[in-house]
Amino acid sequence: MAFSPGGTRPVIPILVLLTGGLFAAFPAASGGRVDAGDMLMMDRFRQWQATHNRSYLSAEERLRRFEVYRTNVEYIDATNRRGGLTYELGENQFADLTGEEFLARYAGGHTGSAITTAAEADGSLEADPPASVDWRAKGAVTPVKNQGSQCYSCWAFSAVATMESLYFIKTGKLVALSEQQLVDCDKYDGGCNKGYYHRAFQWIMENGGITTAAQYPYKAVRGACSAAKPAVTITGHLAVAKNELALQSAVARQPIGVAIEVPISMQFYKSGVFSAACGIQMSHAVVTVGYGADASGLKYWLVKNSWGQTWGEAGYIRMRRDVGGGGLCGIALDTAYPTM
């Protein structure tokens, strides 16, 4: 059954929906009938549920999530049709969350008040930094992990990721380290209730190191601190001077923890160089593992996130580089990296 855009859309009795078992409470606009556009959207939602293994406790909740999904999909499609963008949005595991829900669950884990002082910020610059760097290609980056939706632990994932990479650079060994140990044991931070990577580094130093993820696996909930033998330790931690040139020089040496603001559009980032309007209310900690330029010459930062591998470019985002000030979304304003 076909219809033309802008024309009268055919309607289908709601009994079809009931028979399909999808929505027993779908609101028909008139006379218990639903148009073909709704049917197509519901089929798309059903496929999305299957892809992401999503189920709901009640028909009412399923209906509410469908309405959120439809609003998000319409936003994604309209944004991509607009043209002229350097990035693309797409459906992902967050497609049934409102923007407010998404930000509340995934983008509120970073809180400041650095232990380091301005004098400890590293302003040194490489004389001739390479045009591009990708620490993944060097084998220095562990697979993308997932912090989950119930634990504000991005700060721990960022701190741990920088340690994993630096340990590889120093030893040639790539070892997954334990975010959960920080969540449970770091007395300077709030576990699943926000934290700061500089404070995490301070605790790691005082603890004599951090253990492996295999010995202390992630559970996405704060528990009692368990004794664990340290596997990797650090000698200190520093920040980078608050500009993109200094950050480039630092990333050329090792992956760097950074804090960013998360605009609503980042919820559905799929690919390309993200360049949407963004402020500097940095509430999410990630890791810059490289930089470069795309085929058109557009410069970007290569950023490892902790939202799983089904978000973005297999868990990564490329963010526009050299935009002035503190960088897009404040990427150069609040940084951290360990020393060994």
Image (spheres, grey):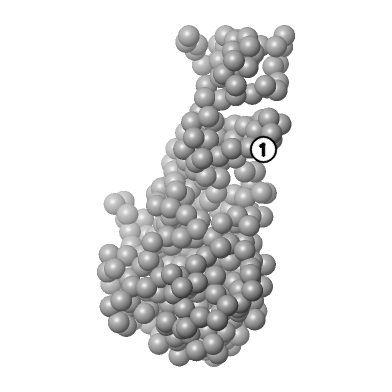
Q: Is residue 169 visible?
A: yes
Q: Can you tell which quarter of the image residue 188 is in?
A: bottom right
Q: x and y percent of residue 68 in the render?
A: 64, 36
Name the foreground residue: 220 vs 75.
Answer: 220
Residue 210, placed above or below residue 324: below
Residue 296's place in the image compared with 305, above or below, is: above
Would residue 283 be visible to someone looking at this image? no
Q: In this image, 238 relative to 186: left or right?
A: left
Q: Residue at x 48, y 31 (%)?
A: 47
Residue 157 in picture, x, y percent from top left: 51, 68
* Quarter of the image where one finds residue 98: top right
Image side of residue 152 versus residue 43, left or right: right
Q: Classify mark 1: residues with Cα within 10 Å, few (<14), some (14-19) or many (20+).
A: few
Amino acid type for the residue under numbered disc 1: Leu
Residue at the location (63% across, 17% down)? Answer: 18
Which residue is the site of mark 1? 57
